[in-house]
Amino acid sequence: MEEKYQLIVIGAGPGGYEAAIRAAQLGIKTALVEENELGGTCLNRGCIPTKTLLHSSNLYYESNNFKELGLKIDGISYDLGRLYERKNEVVEKIQSGIGALLKANKIDVYYGRGVIEGPGKVKLFLKESEEVRLLEADNLLLATGSKPLVPNIPGIDLDYVMTSDDLLAGKKDFNKLIIVGGGVIGCEFATIFTQLGMEVEIVEAADRILPSLDKEISQSAAMNLKKKGAIIHTKSKLERIEKDEEHGRTLKLTVSAADKIKELTADAVLICIGRKANVDNLLSAGVTLECEKGWIKTDERFMTNISGIYAVGDVTGGIQLAHNASAQGITVAELIAGSEPTINRKSIPSCVYMNPEIASVGLTEEDAKKSEIDFVTGKYPMSGNCKTLLSMDERSYIKVIAEKESGKLLGAQIICARATDMIGEFSLAIANGLTAEEMHTAVRPHPTYEEGITEALADTLTGAIHLM
Ligand code: FAD
C-alpha cells in the first residue's frame, strides 16, 4: 500500500466510510483507518443491532392480536439467544458488504488506531502487530464518533450495570431491567424488552421521557410504553447502585425524586444518559483541536480550527444520527473534490424506533411559538386511517406545522406505524421550500399510512375528509 494520500479518513462509521467511498468515486486517493470494526457504532453497537432486535420484538408483541386477526399459533414463545444470534448475522452480512464496497472503490483500509501528528500527518498503530507507520495526506477527516457517557456514581462498576454497548454485546440474562435515561436510546430499549414481556422501569431526570420531542408526542410515547407494562419515573435522578447481598444478583438503586428518595430493584441496569466524543488519544502532544463541551468544533464547511483537518458525525456533537453523519461525510468528500454541495440542516429528520414509530423534522409547535412565527397546525388522528385500522395499530397521529401567510411547511411530527419511512416526504418539502398546498396536490395511494399525510395537510387548508 502507498502511504501518501489526498485524503485519510479516521473512523469507519457511516460518516467515515461513506466519505471515503464518495471521495474515491470522485477520483481522490483515499485511505480509511479503523481501530475496531467497519460500520462503526451504527452497524455494530447502534442502529442495526437495535432495529434487528426490535423487529423480532415487534412481531412477538403483535402476536397478541393474532386471535383477533384470525391467526392461530399455539404457545408462541421466543429464544433470546437466537434473537441475538440473528442480530450478529445481520451485522456481519452488512459489514462484509461495506468491506466489498471499500475494496471495489480501491480504498486502502488500515486496521489500527490513528493519531493526528499535525496537519496532513497520521501516526498509525496497527492493530495486529506492534508496527507503527506514518501516513500522509493533503486532507484529514475525523469521523471517530461517540461513546456512552457513564456517570461517576457509587456502584457504576457493578456487574450488570451496563451501557448500550454491553447490552448489545450479549449481557441479556435478566427479567427486570431499569433503564436510566428516557431519551431516544433508552426508549428504544424499553420498547424491545417490554414487548418481550420483561419488567422495565425508566428513570428520567426531566419531567417527561423524550424531552427533546414535541410535548404531545412524548406524552403519547409514554402512554404507549405504559400500556406495554413499563413504569416511568420522571424528575428522578439516580444517586447510587448497590448489590443486594441477600437476594443474589439483585441490584438496589437509590433514586432522588422531587421530594423523596426512592429505592428500586432490578437484576440489570442500563445506563443511557447521553454520549461523549471519541477524542481520547486522538491527538499527539502539541496538536490542539478546538472543542465545545467536549465535541470537536467545525465551521460551516466541517473544517476544524486546523486547516485541512475536517470533522463530521457524532464526534462534532449536534444531531447524533447516522444519516446526518453520512450526509456530512459525503459533503466533505465533495468539498475536497472542488464542488459546493449543501445540506439543508432544517430537513434532517429525527427518528425514534418505538412501536408505533416516531419521526420528526423541522419545527415543533413549541418551537414555532417560541420563534414568534405566525403558524397553523394540521393534525390527523390515524384512527380514521384505513391501514391503521385494518392493521390494529396503536394510538397514532400526524401533525404538520406551516407558516400561516405563505403556507410554507415548517415542520412535521408523526407517531404511527412506518413513521420513519414517511418522514422523508416532509424532509423533501422543507429542503425545497414547499407549501402545505403543494404537498397536498400529490395523490397518495390507498390504503396506506401515507394517506394520513394528505389528511394532516388538508387540516391546515380546507379540512381533512375522514375527520369529524
Ligand atoms: P461512529 O459510527 O461512532 O464510528 C466511529 C468509528 O471511529 C468507530 O468505528 C470507532 O472505532 C472509530 N475510531 C474512533 N477513534 C478512532 C481512532 N483514533 N483511530 C481509528 N478508529 C477510530 N442513528 C440513527 O440514525 N438511527 C438509529 O436507529 C440509531 N440507533 C442507535 C442506537 C444506539 C443504541 C446507539 C448507541 C446509536 C444509535 N444511532 C442511531 C446513532 C448512530 O449510531 C450514530 O449517530 C452514528 O453511528 C455516528 O456515525 P459516525 O460515523 O459519526 O461515528
Image (cartoon, rainbow, N blue to C red):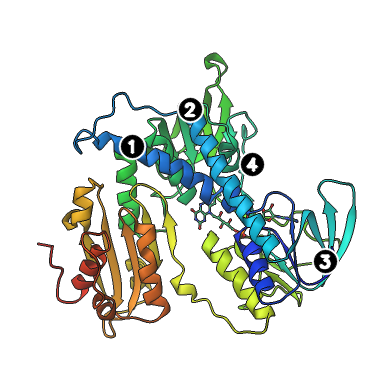
Q: Earlier in the sequence, mark 2 or mark 4?
A: 4
Q: Earlier in the sequence, mark 3 or mark 4?
A: 4
Residue at image mark 1: 61
Q: Position of residue 236 (x, y in %)?
A: 45, 42
User: What amino acid type is highlighted by mark number 4?
Assistant: Asn
Residue 363 in view: no
Q: Position of residue 330 (x, y in %)?
A: 60, 71
Which numbered tag is attached to residue 266?
Answer: 2
User: What amino acid type is highlighted by mark number 1?
Assistant: Tyr
| Residue at 53 percent of width and 34 percent of height | 269
Q: Earlier in the sequence, mark 4 or mark 1?
A: 1
Q: Nearer the viewer, residue 274 or 90?
A: 90
Residue at image mark 3: 287
| 62 left or right, relative to 166 | left
Q: Nearer the viewer, residue 21 or 40?
A: 21
Whether label 3 lies within 8 Å of ligand 1 gets the answer no
Which numbered tag is attached to residue 152?
Answer: 4
User: What amino acid type is highlighted by mark number 3?
Assistant: Val
Q: Is residue 294 above or below residue 336?
A: above
Quadrant of the rendering where the C terminus is positioned? bottom left
Quadrant of the rendering where the N terminus is positioned? bottom right
SS assignment at label 2: strand
Q: Pointers 3 and 4 in contact (CB under 8 A)? A: no
Distance CA(mark 1)–CA(mark 3)? 52 Å
Quadrant field for ligand 1: bottom right
Nearer to us of marks 3 and 4 is 3
